[in-house]
Image (cartoon, rainbow, N blue to C red):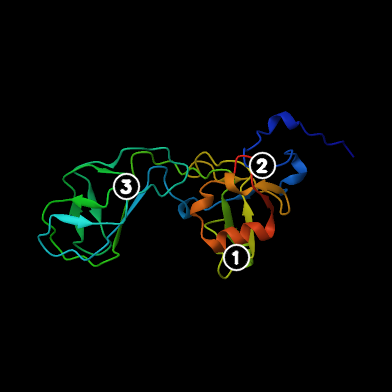
């Protein structure tokens, strides 16, 4: 049998990794992700924080934020003139002023159809790549595995039968949805995982129960 050797220099160590990264710490065989389960780089979800009546020209919304933790976009995230669709027929709103991160109100043309509190609209942005950062929790059920379905957003409530952290970033899941997963019980800096502070307590608990989680020296 031919001897198999590894070149550790081909591995780039994520900053959240708390021990030496070697091939033995990766799940063998490779895996796939379902690209549509994740967000575009510049994707923004607009969620109404109050009902909107016909002919209103101002919408109160939850503070605007980027959906994808890989996004580095600042300032204006939805340009004036964009049409937002809130899900049902005729529920279109044309905004008349730029929308920036942190905004809690949107100026628009007179709204043609009444909207309900918590209605949502998604703006995909100009960057239509789907980047999945290293250290992202992904999951699937055994039924999905048997059907050949890739990993998607983790269900930590039921929970999914398989939950793993991604070892490396997926540069654009639309073009190439291969992903490398990190073995359980590996040592990680939890506070350096992408979006850690914004994860639900259930998601944090799911990671802590599967990996050896410590705080970084800077924490």
Is 25 displayed left or right of 100 in the figure? Answer: right
Q: How far is disc 3 from disc 2 in space, using C-alphas?
A: 31 Å
Write down the residue under mark 1.
160
Considering the numbered disc 2 on the image, is that residue within a helix, a strand or a loop? loop
Q: Which mark is residue 102?
A: 3
Q: Which sits in the foreground, 197 or 163?
A: 197
The numbered mark, 1 or 2, whose residue comes first in the sequence reads 2
Quadrant holding the N terminus: top right
* In the image, residue 196 above or below residue 143: above
* In the image, residue 139 above or below residue 187: below
Considering the numbered disc 3 on the image, is that residue within a helix, a strand or a loop? loop
Q: Position of residue 7 (x, y in %)?
A: 76, 31
Locate residue 205: give its quadrant. bottom right
Write down the residue under mark 2.
17
Q: How far is disc 1 from disc 2 in space, using C-alphas?
A: 24 Å
The numbered mark, 3 or 2, whose residue comes first in the sequence reads 2
Quadrant holding the C terminus: top right
The numbered mark, 1 or 3, whose residue comes first in the sequence reads 3
Which residue is at 61% across, 67% downward?
A: 143
Which residue is at 11% across, 64% downward?
A: 54
Please tell me whether mark 1 or mark 2 is closer to you in this view: 2
* In the image, residue 206 above or below residue 38: below
Residue farthest toward the bottom in the current orientation of the protein: 158
Q: Position of residue 217 (x, y in %)?
A: 65, 40
Please tell me whether mark 3 or mark 2 is closer to you in this view: 3
Q: Position of residue 125 (x, y in %)?
A: 33, 43
Considering the numbered disc 1 on the image, is that residue within a helix, a strand or a loop? loop
Structural crowding at the residue carrying mark 3, measured as other residues with C-alpha within 10 Å and reported as few (<14), some (14–19) or many (≥20): some
Which residue is at 12% across, 51% downward?
A: 109
Q: How far is disc 1 from disc 3 in space, using C-alphas?
A: 33 Å
Which residue is at 69% across, 42% downward?
A: 18
Is 25 displayed left or right of 55 in the figure? Answer: right
């Amino acid at each position: 049998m031919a001897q198999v050797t590894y070149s550790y220099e081909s591995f780039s160590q994520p900053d959240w990794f708390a021990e030496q990264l070697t091939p033995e710490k990766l799940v063998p065989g490779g895996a796939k992700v379902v690209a549509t389960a994740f967000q575009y780089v510049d994707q923004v979800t607009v969620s109404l924080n109050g009902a909107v009546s016909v002919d209103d020209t101002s919408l109160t919304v939850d503070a605007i934020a980027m959906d994808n933790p890989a996004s580095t976009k600042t300032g204006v995230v939805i340009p004036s003139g964009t049409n937002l669709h809130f899900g049902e027929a005729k529920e279109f709103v044309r905004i008349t002023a730029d929308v920036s991160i942190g905004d809690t109100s949107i100026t628009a043309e007179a709204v043609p159809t009444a909207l309900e509190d918590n209605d949502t609209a998604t703006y995909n942005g100009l960057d239509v790549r789907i980047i999945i950062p290293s250290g992202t929790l992904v999951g699937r059920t055994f039924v999905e595995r048997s059907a050949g379905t890739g990993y998607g957003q983790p269900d930590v409530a039921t929970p999914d039968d398989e939950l793993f952290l991604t070892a490396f970033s997926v540069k654009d899941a639309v073009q190439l949805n291969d992903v490398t997963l990190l073995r359980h019980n590996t040592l990680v800096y939890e506070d350096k995982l992408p979006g850690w502070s914004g994860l639900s307590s259930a998601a944090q608990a799911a990671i802590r129960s599967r990996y050896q989680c410590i705080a970084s020296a800077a924490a």
